[in-house]
Image (cartoon, grey):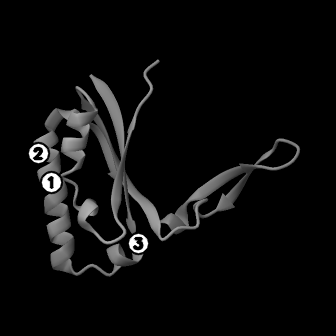
Amino acid sequence: MAKYLVLIYGDEQEWDSASPAELTAKHAAHEAFAAAAGPAILGGEQLQAASTATTLRTLSGGRAVPIDGPFPESKEVLGGYYVLEAPDLDAAVALAGMLPEIAESGGGVEIRPIVSR
């Protein structure tokens, strides 16, 4: 079985302005995803706001320096992730296709194979 990192992207302003009913529906969709995926989910978490991120950059001289905020200047930010175990990419795509962020304006899901060593 291969492992895949499923990165969930979206617009924080949309997430922050969601109504209680919209949030309840989104949570229910994630619960349905978790039920369908079952033991294929090896881990996953919602992330705090992008404004809480710290990015490390190397300055001249080779020293790593922390910089507040996410590196990319983008409306879409990483909001959470799952680590899935699936027999192949097609199976990972089928599972990740259930995530509600795919249908959101500015939302999306990235699936990346994890290197096994």
Q: Residue furthest top?
A: 117
- Is 43 left, or right, of 33 in this rendering? right
Labels 3, 1: front one: 3
In three-dimensional space, the C-alpha distance between marks 2 and 1, rounded to whole angstroms, equals: 6 Å
Q: What residue appears at the point 63 percent right and 54 percent down from the top-left corner?
A: 55
- Where, by quadrant of the figure, is residue 62 drawn? top right
**One can see residue 56 in this view:** yes
Q: Residue at x 15, y 59 (%)?
A: 29
Q: Earlier in the sequence, mark 3 or mark 1?
A: 3
Q: Amino acid at mark 1?
A: Glu
The spot of residue 2 in percent (x, y) is 31, 25
Q: Position of residue 37 (x, y in %)?
A: 16, 40
Q: Nearer the viewer, residue 115 or 31?
A: 115
Q: Secondary structure at mark 1?
A: helix
Judge whether 71 appears above or below 97 on screen: below
Is there CB contact under 8 Å for labels 2 and 1? yes
Which residue is depicted at the point 16% across and 70% down? Answer: 24
Q: Which residue is mark 2?
A: 35
Which mark identifies residue 12?
Answer: 3
Q: CA distance from mark 2 to mark 3?
A: 26 Å
Is label 3 in contact with label 1 (beta carbons under 8 Å)? Answer: no
The tag on residue 31 is: 1
- Badge 3: residue crowd in 10 Å (few <14, some 14–19, many ≥20): some
Q: Residues within 10 Å of mark 2 (few under 14, many from 20)?
A: few
Q: Amino acid at mark 3?
A: Glu
Under circle 2, the secondary element is helix
Coordinates of residue 45 in the picture (x, y in percent): 34, 50
